[in-house]
Image (tube, helix red, strand yellow):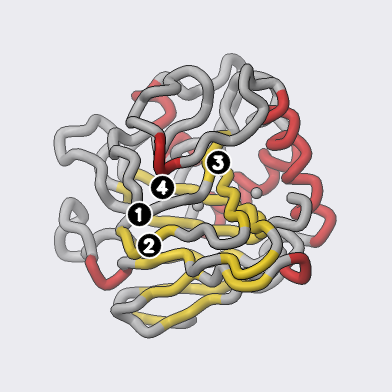
């Protein structure tokens, strides 16, 4: 437990080394099947500019900002990414970690790539409109699946809490994005940033060859995947 008010939790060995490596496979396959095989730079994208291609800032209505110079892709129903057994096992574990919250409440797994010199400046994850059918982002589950020995820098830093988390393969960090007293009010204490990668490349699942790899889940109050049309045919979410 890194912080109790608000709570920020770090779990080492949340995934095995084999799971972390296997989680990259469907992501690579998805990226390579895109019309443009290279991840698009966040700083030059407009929100929704590549709708349908899988590359955008998020799926909850927030825009792309120049504060971020990483690249982004999503593990969705197109192709086999979201049906991959390793991805499904990770999603079940995330649901269990959060007390059984269904993964239907989560945005699809986000893949982040940070190359040398890239960063994501201080920001907050809760930026869903109050009127959205899926409600606010309640929690963030951030997993590090890249080989942390292949790059330096890229730590996750919470400036208001004075907490810096190294990107260690297999670890997961969980934090709240809203206040207990009012879940529609974001908790600014969990502002955070991804510090610049000083060498190598980092992926994150917010995944890698000489990169820092991460897996990111944003968990909403209500059923994001159902409301957004993101539920796969014949796909049972936990």
- The mark lying in front, picked from 1 and 4, is 1
Could you tell me residue 152's position as x and y percent? Answer: 66, 72
Q: Earlier in the sequence, mark 3 or mark 2?
A: 3
Quote the CA–CA distance across marks 2 and 4.
Answer: 21 Å
- The mark lying in front, picked from 4 and 3, is 3
Quote the CA–CA distance across marks 3 and 1.
Answer: 21 Å
Disc 1, SS? loop
Residue of label 4: 219
Towards the viewer: 67 or 162: 67
Towards the viewer: 97 or 173: 173
Q: Residues within 10 Å of mark 2 (few under 14, many from 20)?
A: some
Q: Earlier in the sequence, mark 3 or mark 1?
A: 1
Above or below, comparing residue 55 to residue 90 in the picture:
above
Residue 145 in view in this figure = no
Residue 133 lies left or right of residue 202; in this view the side is left
Towards the viewer: 231 or 36: 36
Residue of label 3: 109
Q: Residues within 10 Å of mark 4 (few under 14, many from 20)?
A: many
Residue 173 in view in this figure = yes
Circle on res. 157: none
Could you tell me residue 66's position as x and y percent? Answer: 34, 48
Asked whether the residues under the numbered discs 2 and 1 touch, taking CB atoms below 8 Å apart as contact, a structural biologist would say yes
Residue 113 lies left or right of residue 231; in this view the side is right
């Amino acid at each position: 437990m890194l912080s109790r008010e608000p709570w920020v939790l770090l779990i080492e060995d949340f995934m095995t080394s084999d799971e972390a490596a296997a989680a990259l496979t469907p992501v690579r396959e998805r990226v390579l099947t895109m019309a443009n095989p290279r991840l698009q730079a966040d700083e030059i994208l407009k929100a929704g500019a590549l709708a349908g291609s899988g590359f955008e800032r998020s799926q909850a209505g927030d825009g792309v900002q120049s504060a971020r110079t990483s690249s982004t892709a999503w593990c969705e129903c197109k192709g086999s990414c979201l049906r991959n057994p390793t991805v499904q096992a990770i999603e079940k574990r995330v649901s269990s970690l959060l007390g059984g919250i269904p993964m239907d409440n989560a945005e699809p797994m986000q893949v982040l790539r940070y190359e040398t010199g890239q960063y994501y400046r201080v920001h907050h994850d809760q930026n869903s409109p109050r009127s959205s059918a899926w409600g606010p982002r309640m929690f963030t589950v951030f997993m590090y699946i890249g080989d942390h020995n292949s790059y330096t820098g890229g730590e996750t830093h919470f400036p208001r809490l004075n907490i810096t988390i190294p990107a260690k393969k297999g670890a997961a960090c969980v934090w709240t994005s809203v206040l207990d007293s009012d879940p529609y009010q974001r908790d600014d204490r969990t502002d955070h940033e991804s510090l610049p990668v000083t060498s190598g490349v980092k992926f994150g699942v917010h995944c890698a060859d000489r990169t820092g790899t991460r897996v990111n889940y944003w968990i909403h109050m209500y059923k994001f995947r159902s409301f957004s049309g993101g539920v796969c045919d014949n796909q049972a979410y936990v």
